[in-house]
Image (spheres, rainbow, N blue to C red):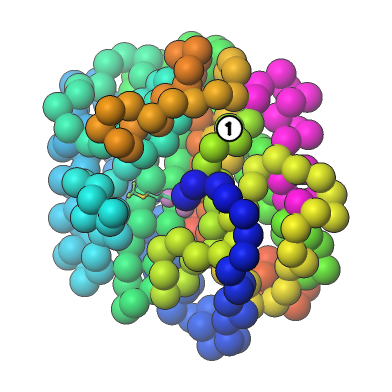
Amino acid sequence: MDGGAEQRQITIHKPEDFVPMRAAGALAAEVLDMVGAHVRPGISTGEIDRICHDYIVARGAIPAPLNYRGFPKSTCISINHVVCHGIPGDRVLMDGDILNIDITVILDGWHGDSSRMYIAGTASTKARRLIDVTYQSLLEGIRAARPGAHFGDIGHAIQTYVEAQRFSVVRDFCGHGIGRRFHEAPNVLHFGRKGDGPELRPGMFFTIEPMVNAGRPEVKVLDDGWTAVTRDRSLSAQFEHMVGITESGCEVFTLAAGEVI
Ligand code: MF3
Ligand code: CO
Ligand code: CO
């Protein structure tokens, strides 16, 4: 999702809307759980995409990226210095590659959107630290998500943590409201100031999906119109969860098997 001025209404979903959202989020998480066993040196990103596509369709769901604004595949797979929106294809994984797999399903009309990092073979210490910091930054963001807080609190929590670890937060892409539509208000920035932005209220559904670079934060989009890479070619990592604001905090709809937050 691209950033931009916030002028759209944020949907307040009904308590019963948590039920289909939970199911959509659980399916996205299940695909990410499943695909981990296939990530290894020698497999192509196109093969990984096909495995995910077939699994999603077999579950009666639709892979949301396919034909979304012209995106040609069912998943986004972003390797090493690719920040996000990598297009699966002939690229074969090599030992030491780190990659993000981003899955969005549409189940009974509701979107489930989540992404995680994977390692092909054995990654460098630096790459593993980048992955750890990026995951922890997502948890910092989730911790800040509760009624009465502001969206800026989430961005501030993520940015503060990441920069203390001497990595940088990508500014050009953000999280987003989600539900019956893939991307809706608000833009969920992964940087910012406490108290900025709209107030969080029960029934808001949105993603938090920080992209963290080992080097500078600047990105550029390649000529395919999708693939975003770090300008300095440093490594980049991303994790994405989808949450719903409750009366007391937030529910994470996309937990992995065994993931406790
Ligand atoms: N799943 C991505 C997100 O987290 C969006 C992918 S859009 C696509 O918002 F067209 F590239 F698939
Ligand atoms: Co998303
Ligand atoms: Co996503």
Front residue of 126/226: it is 226
Front residue of 23/227: it is 227
In the rendered structure, does residue 165 fall within the stretch colored magenta? yes
In the rendering, at what x and y percent does residue 223 appear?
Answer: 28, 28
Which residue corresponds to mark 1? Answer: 170
Tell me what residue is drawn at x 58 percent, y 32 percent: 170
Query: Residue 40 falls in which quadrant of the image?
Result: top left
Q: Which residues are magenta?
A: 152-168
Tell me what residue is drawn at x 84 percent, y 49 percent: 194
In the rendered structure, does residue 174 fall within the stretch colored magenta? no
In the rendering, at what x and y percent does residue 249 appear?
Answer: 74, 67
Q: Is residue 235 above or below residue 146?
A: above
Q: Is residue 116 above or below residue 201?
A: above
Query: Residue 67 falls in which quadrant of the image?
Result: bottom left
| Within-10-Å neighbours for mark 1: few <14, some 14–19, many 20+ | many
Horizontal relation, residue 3 to residue 226: left or right: right
Residue 139 visible at all: no
